[in-house]
Image (tube, coloured by chain):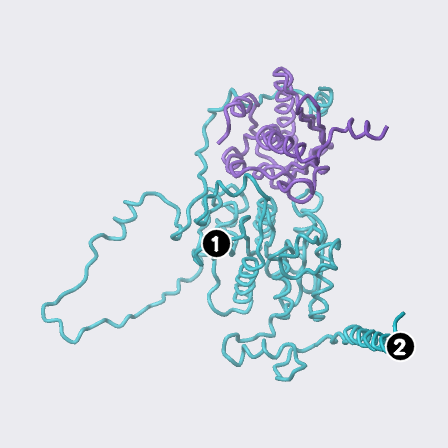
Amino acid sequence: MVDEVTKKTLAQIPLLKTKAGPRDGEQWIQRLKEEYQSLIQYVKNNKDADNDWFRLESNKEGTRWFGKCWYIYELIKYEFEVDFDMPITYPTTAPEIALPELDGKTAKMYRGGKICLTDHFKPLWARNVPKFGIAHAMALGLGPWLAVEIPDLIARGVVIPKDAGAGDKS
Amino acid sequence: MATITELKARVADLERQLADALQTKSAPNRGKITQMSAEVVDSNPYSRLMALKRMGIVENYERIRDFTVAVVGVGGVGSVTAEMLTRCGIGKLLLFDYDKVELANMNRLFYQPHQAGMSKVEAAERTLKEINPDVEFEVYNYNITTTENFDHFQGRIKQGGIGGDKPVDLVLSCVDNFEARMAINMACNECDQKWFESGVSENAVTGHIQFLIPGETACFACAPPLVVASKIDEKTLKRDGVCAASLPTTMGVVAGFLVQNVLKYLLQFGDVSYYLGYNAMLDFFPRMILKPNPQCDDSYCKKRQTEFQAREATRPKVQVEITEAEVVHEDNEWAIEIVSETTADELAAAEGDQPELTKGVRVAYTTPAPTQGGDQDATVQDSGQSLDDLMKQMQGL
């Protein structure tokens, strides 16, 4: 259900151990530290593999996350804003990652630009509570989504390179 | 140029339209009714409901005015649920939703095209107040799963009842995603609040309702999601296509089941279903009770389970003696009797340790037993850095 490359990527992301959500005080701070450590390692791995594809940061409380992700298709880089809220039920439920600027452009999204995950994401997440964190959600959720959807959006002309748009005007 | 006859006809037509419009506008909203009456007259909106008493179904229908129900999610199922409760004369409704009405919602019931762009709770409140001005409303246009709203949401469950210092009588979950259901589950387990869950599958052909009593029946986190065999290859569903299909029919059926069981619970008639499924492809309705999981992931669920068991232990045992009349055949010369080949115990042993499920329902996945320290190498180790350091490091990448 998960391809070999994803499996390998996944295996290299450090797992988490503290089961705590945004309402759990000190425990949540501990969880946040683990989240950041795991994310930092994942971004480093991506850089090493020449596959750097996102940046994320959060507010002080770690309840709201935002950043950018990008996808390179036919040598052109397409960049999108990413954001999501930490649900109070985290980490029992995964965060709902959103690309707000693509809202309404593809059917594979829920309102607000929350990406539609495949059938196997939720069972896989549920089996790995609390070991999976944000880095895993990015690797298993957003990564594969971009790989499938962005080429299609480009082919349909719904997503155009940002520079090209500026070039047309001049 | 139009002739005078044509113009006259046009004027007459416009006058008629104006009169029509004025009439609809001037149709007076009925005033509030202080006492529900059983009098059978055309002008009494409650006569057919109060007739339930005369028919011997409900003992005291007027009690419905004392009850408060919170509806979380007023989409395809929630809006119809709220309308049914409003028409039944419920005392108070609390509505929660953060969505806006869209034209894409028009394949479902309740909302109308001219409401597009309005927040769902506001649009619903307006329509419902017009239908029944006796119902009290409290509406909240926010997402209950975020940290800043969850506490307020829980506060309204605890103090949202009529009068303001008692909890609501029931919470109805009519949301469309797992995260929101888990949030309601968390809130209700903490507040010891009875609630109903409802749902329609993303392919629009199966649905269910479930009655959750903290500690007594399974909470939403107790069992992994169950899948009702849908007679469709599940793999073909999601990949290429829209995320969610919906039908007004399935949603109407589920809303009907939900409110029917709410009424049965509140007004104490009939048997309340603990779990009722609906498979539209086969018109199959599994019904069962789900026991709580002693190893549930939710600590409050486990706490409620202990409390429930303590209550059960102290409750005087009511011995219901069912005396079945012995079936005696007029003649049985050779004393023939029917005896089962296997005992119930033998059957259970052969089946092994399985959750009690109704026919047609299977477990979607199982959770592996927790490993003891097996993942040590792959787990993040405490690096001694503070959260600020880590945040800076992330930003600096």
Please identify, in this view, whether the residue under mark 2 or under mark 1 is nearer the observer. 2
Position of residue A65 in the picture relative to residue A13 (left or right): right
Question: Which chain's colour is purple?
Answer: A
Q: Amino acid at mark 1?
A: Glu
Name the spot of residue B235 as percent of width and height, x first. Answer: 48, 40
- Tag 2 secondary structure: helix
Q: Which mark is residue B4?
A: 2
**Quadrant where the N terminus of chain B is found in the figure:** bottom right
For chain B, the rendered hue is cyan
Dot 1 corresponds to which residue?
B216
Name the spot of residue B14 as percent of width and height, x first. Answer: 83, 73
Residue lying farthest to the left in this orientation = B334
Let me know if residue B144 appears in the view: yes
Name the spot of residue A89 as percent of width and height, x first. Answer: 60, 41
Q: Kindly identify the residue that appears in the image at 75 percent across and 55 percent down.
A: B118
Decide which of B63, B29 is in the foreground and name it: B29
**Quadrant where the C terminus of chain B is found in the figure:** top right
Please give the count of numbered marks on the rendered protein: 2
Name the spot of residue B56 as percent of width and height, x first. Answer: 49, 78
Badge 1: residue crowd in 10 Å (few <14, some 14–19, many ≥20): some
Q: Amino acid at mark 2?
A: Ile
Figure quadrant of residue A92: top right
